[in-house]
Image: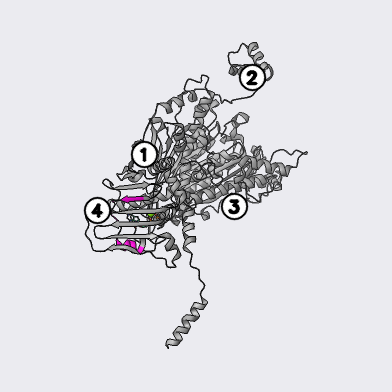
C-alpha cells in the first residue's frame, strides 16, 4: 500500500514542469515599471491608508508620516496604528493582494505590491518594524540572501504577540539600506529632494490637507490646495456622476473645469490640463494628452491638441469608491486605465465640460492677437486678470462653463470678420504706407483692401 | 445652420424638404408612448421661416423650443420673424452653443446642416448623442451632393480624397472606395459615418451602465432627396433599455418611409398641376399604390403622388 503511493508521487512528479519564477526576475519586473518617486509615494499612501482605517473620511490630525532620504539610508515612519501580526503573516508581505484580504474603505492600497516594490526599488536590505496596541514585530531581510533561497517566505526577526502598547507608541517604520548606487546618487542631490517634496505635496494633498503631518528630511510638506479663478462670469463647470452596479460598490465622480491662473510660467504649464484623483490620490497632474481627451484620434468629440493658449484651462476629476478595485488607475498610480468602462464614460463627460472652456480660451487668444494697442487689455483678458484664484472646493460652480458675452461680441449688427495676414517687401510697404498716409501697417492692409474692393468688387 | 438659404429661395417651396418635415412629425408623434410631447424640447436651426418650429409646435404641441442661429448678420430680421413666443434664440455657431445648452429634458434635436459634413459637425453630433436623455430623437441632415464631374480628373480619387480631408481620417470607414461616392453613394456613406459616430458615442456613454440603463440608437429615418442639391437625412431615437421596451422598432413599421438601416427612402416630388392633384386626391387612398387613373396624367407622376400625397405641400399650406 505504502509502496504504491510512493510510486504514484514519483510518477506525478515526473509529469510536472517547474514554472516557479526566479526571485531576481520578479524583483526586476516589479521595479522596472515604476520610477523612484512614485515608489516612495506608495509608502506614504500606506501610512495614510492605515490612518484612514481608523478615521474614515474624517480629520487625520495627530497622525504623522516622516520620510527621510540620505545616501546611506531611506526610512519612513508613521504613528498611524501599525500592522497586526496577522496582517504581516498573511497579507502585508505577499506579492499581490490575496483573495479575502481585508480592505480599508476608500483606500489607496489595492494591488498589494506597493510596499515590496518600493523597498526593492530603493535597496537590497530592509527592516520593517511595526507596533500595534497588542503586538510588535520586526522583519529584517537581506535581499541578496533572500533572492538565493528557493522559498518565497520572509521570517520575523522579532515577534511579540501579546504585548500591550500605548496607542501613542503604535506605528510602522520601514528602513532600507544598502541602497542601489543610482538611488544613493539621487538621494544625495538637492534637486531630487526638491522634486520628491513637490511630488509628495501634490500627490498626497488629500491626506495632508486632512491633517496627516508629512515631513521630508524633517521639513514639513504642506498641502497645496487646487485653485481656480473665481468670478461670477468665469464660474467653473461642475458635474457629479454616480456609477452603481448591482453587487458592486458605488463609484462617484466629481468633475470641475474652468479657468485658472498661476503665479509663474513654469507652474502655469504644470497646472494646465486635467488633474485626476482616485480616492484622493493624485494620479495625473495637469494632463494634456489624449488620455484626458486632448487631440484624441479615438474619441468622437473633438478637442484640439494642447497648446500654450490653453495654459489657463484647469480640469479636476475626482473618482471615489469604497472599493478601490473599481477605480481606473494603474498599479503604480501614475496613470489611468483608459479601457475601464467607467473611465470611458467619464472621459466623454470631461470632454463635454472642457469644450466651452477651450472655446473661451480660443476667443481670449483672438482678442489678444487682434488688439490694436499691445498695452491695453481686451474685455476677456481684463476679466481673467481681474478674477481671484480661490480653493476649488470654495468656488461657486455652474453646470456648464458659460463663456461670457463681451461688449464687442454683442454689437447689434455684427459682421463676421476674417483676419488676413501676409508679408510684402518692406520697401514697397513703406511706399504704400506713404501713399495712403497710413499711420500703421494695419491701416495699410485695411486701406489697400478697401481700395481694391471699391475699385473692382463693388 | 448658416441660415442663408432663404436668400436663395423660399424654404417653404422646397417640396421634398416640406414633406420630410411632415414625415418626421408623424413618426415623432409616437414618442408619446414614452412621455407626453408637451414635456419635450425642440432644438433646431431653421431658416427665416421657422417652418420646423411652426410644425412641431402646431402638430406636436412642443412648447419649449430653442433655435441656434449663427447668421448674426441677419440677427434682427430673423428675430422679427419669430412666429411664437416659446421659441428661444441662441445666437452663435452650433459648436459653440450646443455644449452650453441644458440637456435635462427629453428633446428632439434636428441638426439641419446646409454645409458639408466636417469635423466640427461630427463633434456636434457626438456631443448631442452623448448628452440627450433617453427617449429623445436626433436627426441630422447633410448636403450629399457628389458635385460636378471634372473630365480632367479621376473623380473616384478626387471624391475620396475630398471626403477624407473634410471629415478627417479617424471618421473615414476603411473600406469606402471612390467609386462608391457617385450619385447617392455619398449620401449612403455619410449615413454610415454618422451612424458609426452615434454608436461609438453611445457605447462609451453606456460603458459603465447596467443593461437596463445602456443607451442604444433606433434608426427611423434615412432619406434621400433633392430640391436642388442632393441631401441626406438620418435620424432616430436614443433610448435606454427601459424606454426601448415602451417604444420599439415595431411601433414604426407601418410608416412607408420608416428605414432602420442603410436602405434609403427617396423622397420624390411629383410634377403636377393643382387640378391634377385634386383629381388624384379624390380617388386616394383607394387607388393606391397603382394610382391607375386618370390616364392623361403621366403614370410616373401618378405613382409618385400616390406615395407622398399625405405629405405633399398644398398651395393653401405655403408657409410664410
Ligand atoms: N505603514 C503601514 N501601516 C500599517 N499597515 C501597513 C503599512 N504599510 C503597509 N501596510 C500593510 O501592508 C499591506 C501591503 O501594502 P502594499 O503597499 O504592499 O499593498 P497595498 O497597499 O495593499 O496595495 P498597493 O499595491 O495598491 O499599494 C497593506 O495592505 C497594509 O495592510
Ligand atoms: Mg500600498
CA–CA distance between discs 3 and 4?
Answer: 71 Å
Query: Are the numbered discs 1 and 3 placed on the same chain, yes or no?
Result: no
Chain letter of disc 1 in the image: A
Secondary structure of the residue carrying tag 3 is loop
Determine crowd level at label 2: few under 14, some 14-19, many 20+ residues with C-alpha closer than 10 A: few
Residue to which mark 1 is pinned = A224
Q: Position of residue B265 (x, y in %)?
A: 62, 48
Chain letter of disc 4 in the image: A
CA–CA distance between discs 4 and 2?
Answer: 82 Å
Residue to which mark 4 is pinned = A169
- N-term-proximal mark, 1 vs 4: 4
Determine crowd level at label 4: few under 14, some 14-19, many 20+ residues with C-alpha closer than 10 A: some
Q: Are marks 4 and 2 in contact (CB under 8 Å)?
A: no
Q: Is the residue at mark 4 in contact range of ligand 1, meaning its CB lies under 8 Å from it?
A: no
Q: Which mark is residue B261?
A: 3
* Res. B315 image quadrant: top right
Amino acid at each position: 500500500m505504502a509502496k504504491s503511493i510512493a510510486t504514484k508521487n514519483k510518477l506525478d512528479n515526473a509529469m510536472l514542469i517547474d514554472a516557479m519564477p526566479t526571485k531576481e526576475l520578479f524583483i526586476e519586473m516589479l521595479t522596472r515599471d515604476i520610477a523612484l518617486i512614485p515608489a516612495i509615494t506608495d509608502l506614504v499612501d500606506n501610512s495614510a491608508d492605515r490612518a484612514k482605517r481608523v478615521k474614515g473620511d474624517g480629520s487625520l490630525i495627530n497622525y504623522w508620516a516622516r520620510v527621510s532620504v540620505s545616501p546611506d539610508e531611506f526610512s519612513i515612519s508613521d504613528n498611524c496604528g501599525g500592522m497586526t501580526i496577522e496582517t504581516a503573516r498573511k497579507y502585508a508581505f505577499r506579492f499581490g493582494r490575496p483573495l479575502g484580504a481585508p480592505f480599508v474603505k476608500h483606500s489607496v492600497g489595492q494591488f498589494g505590491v506597493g510596499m515590496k516594490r518600493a523597498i526593492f526599488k530603493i535597496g537590497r536590505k530592509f527592516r520593517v518594524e511595526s507596533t500595534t496596541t497588542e503586538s510588535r514585530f520586526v522583519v529584517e531581510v537581506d535581499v541578496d540572501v533572500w533572492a538565493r533561497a528557493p522559498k518565497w517566505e520572509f521570517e520575523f526577526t522579532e515577534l511579540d504577540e501579546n504585548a500591550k502598547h500605548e496607542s501613542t507608541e503604535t506605528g510602522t517604520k520601514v528602513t532600507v539600506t544598502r541602497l542601489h548606487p543610482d538611488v544613493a546618487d539621487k538621494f544625495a542631490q538637492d534637486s531630487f529632494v526638491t522634486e520628491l517634496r513637490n511630488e509628495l505635496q501634490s500627490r498626497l494633498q488629500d491626506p495632508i490637507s486632512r491633517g496627516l503631518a508629512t515631513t521630508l528630511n524633517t521639513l514639513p510638506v504642506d498641502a497645496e490646495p487646487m485653485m481656480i479663478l473665481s468670478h461670477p462670469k468665469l464660474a467653473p463647470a461642475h458635474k457629479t456622476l454616480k456609477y452603481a452596479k448591482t453587487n458592486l460598490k458605488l463609484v462617484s465622480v466629481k468633475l470641475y473645469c474652468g479657468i485658472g491662473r498661476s503665479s509663474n510660467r513654469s507652474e502655469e504649464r504644470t497646472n494646465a490640463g486635467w488633474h485626476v484623483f482616485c480616492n484622493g490620490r493624485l494620479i495625473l497632474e495637469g494632463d494634456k494628452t489624449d488620455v484626458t481627451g486632448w487631440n484624441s484620434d479615438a474619441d468622437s468629440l473633438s478637442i484640439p491638441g494642447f497648446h500654450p493658449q490653453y495654459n489657463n484651462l484647469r480640469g479636476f476629476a475626482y473618482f471615489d469608491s469604497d472599493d478601490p478595485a473599481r477605480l481606473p488607475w494603474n498599479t503604480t498610480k501614475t496613470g489611468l486605465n483608459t479601457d475601464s468602462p467607467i473611465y470611458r464614460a467619464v472621459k466623454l463627460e470631461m470632454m463635454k465640460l472642457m469644450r466651452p472652456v477651450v472655446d473661451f480660451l480660443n476667443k481670449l487668444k483672438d482678442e489678444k492677437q487682434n488688439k490694436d494697442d499691445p498695452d491695453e487689455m481686451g474685455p476677456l483678458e481684463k476679466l481673467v486678470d481681474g478674477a481671484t484664484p480661490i480653493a476649488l472646493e470654495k468656488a461657486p460652480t455652474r453646470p456648464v462653463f458659460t463663456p461670457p458675452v463681451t461688449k464687442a461680441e454683442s454689437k447689434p449688427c455684427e459682421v463676421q470678420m476674417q483676419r488676413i495676414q501676409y508679408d510684402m517687401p518692406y520697401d514697397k510697404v513703406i511706399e504704400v504706407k506713404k501713399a495712403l498716409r497710413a499711420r500703421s501697417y494695419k491701416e495699410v492692409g485695411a486701406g489697400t483692401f478697401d481700395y481694391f474692393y471699391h475699385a473692382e468688387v463693388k | 445652420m448658416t441660415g442663408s438659404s432663404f436668400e436663395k429661395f423660399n424654404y417653404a417651396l422646397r417640396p421634398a424638404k416640406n414633406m420630410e418635415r411632415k414625415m418626421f412629425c408623424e413618426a415623432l408623434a409616437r414618442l408619446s408612448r414614452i412621455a407626453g410631447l408637451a414635456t419635450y424640447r425642440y432644438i433646431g436651426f431653421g431658416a427665416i421661416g421657422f417652418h420646423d418650429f411652426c410644425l412641431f409646435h402646431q402638430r406636436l404641441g412642443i412648447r419649449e423650443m430653442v433655435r441656434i442661429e449663427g447668421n448674426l448678420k441677419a440677427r434682427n430680421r430673423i428675430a422679427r420673424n419669430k412666429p411664437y413666443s416659446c421659441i428661444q434664440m441662441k445666437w452663435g455657431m452650433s459648436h459653440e452653443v450646443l455644449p452650453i445648452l441644458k440637456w435635462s429634458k427629453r428633446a428632439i434635436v434636428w441638426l439641419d446642416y446646409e454645409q458639408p459634413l466636417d469635423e466640427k459637425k461630427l463633434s456636434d453630433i457626438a456631443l448631442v448623442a452623448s448628452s440627450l436623455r433617453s427617449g429623445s430623437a436626433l436627426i441630422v441632415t447633410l448636403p450629399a451632393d457628389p458635385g460636378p464631374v471634372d473630365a480632367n480628373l479621376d473623380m473616384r480619387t478626387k471624391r475620396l480624397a475630398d471626403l477624407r480631408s473634410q471629415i478627417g481620417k479617424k471618421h473615414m470607414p476603411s473600406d469606402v472606395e471612390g467609386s462608391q461616392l457617385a450619385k447617392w453613394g455619398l449620401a449612403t456613406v455619410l449615413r454610415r459615418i454618422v451612424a458609426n459616430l452615434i454608436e461609438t458615442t453611445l457605447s462609451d456613454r453606456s460603458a459603465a451602465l447596467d443593461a437596463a440603463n445602456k443607451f442604444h440608437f433606433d434608426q427611423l429615418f434615412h432619406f434621400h432627396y433633392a430640391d436642388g442639391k442632393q441631401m441626406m437625412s438620418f435620424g432616430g431615437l436614443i433610448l435606454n433599455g427601459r424606454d426601448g421596451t415602451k417604444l420599439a422598432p415595431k411601433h414604426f413599421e407601418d410608416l412607408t418611409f420608416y428605414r432602420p438601416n442603410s436602405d434609403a427612402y427617396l423622397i420624390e416630388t411629383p410634377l403636377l398641376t393643382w387640378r391634377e392633384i385634386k383629381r388624384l386626391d379624390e380617388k386616394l387612398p383607394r387607388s393606391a399604390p397603382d394610382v391607375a387613373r386618370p390616364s392623361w396624367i403621366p403614370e410616373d407622376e401618378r405613382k409618385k403622388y400616390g406615395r407622398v400625397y399625405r405629405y405633399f405641400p398644398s398651395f393653401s399650406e405655403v408657409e410664410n
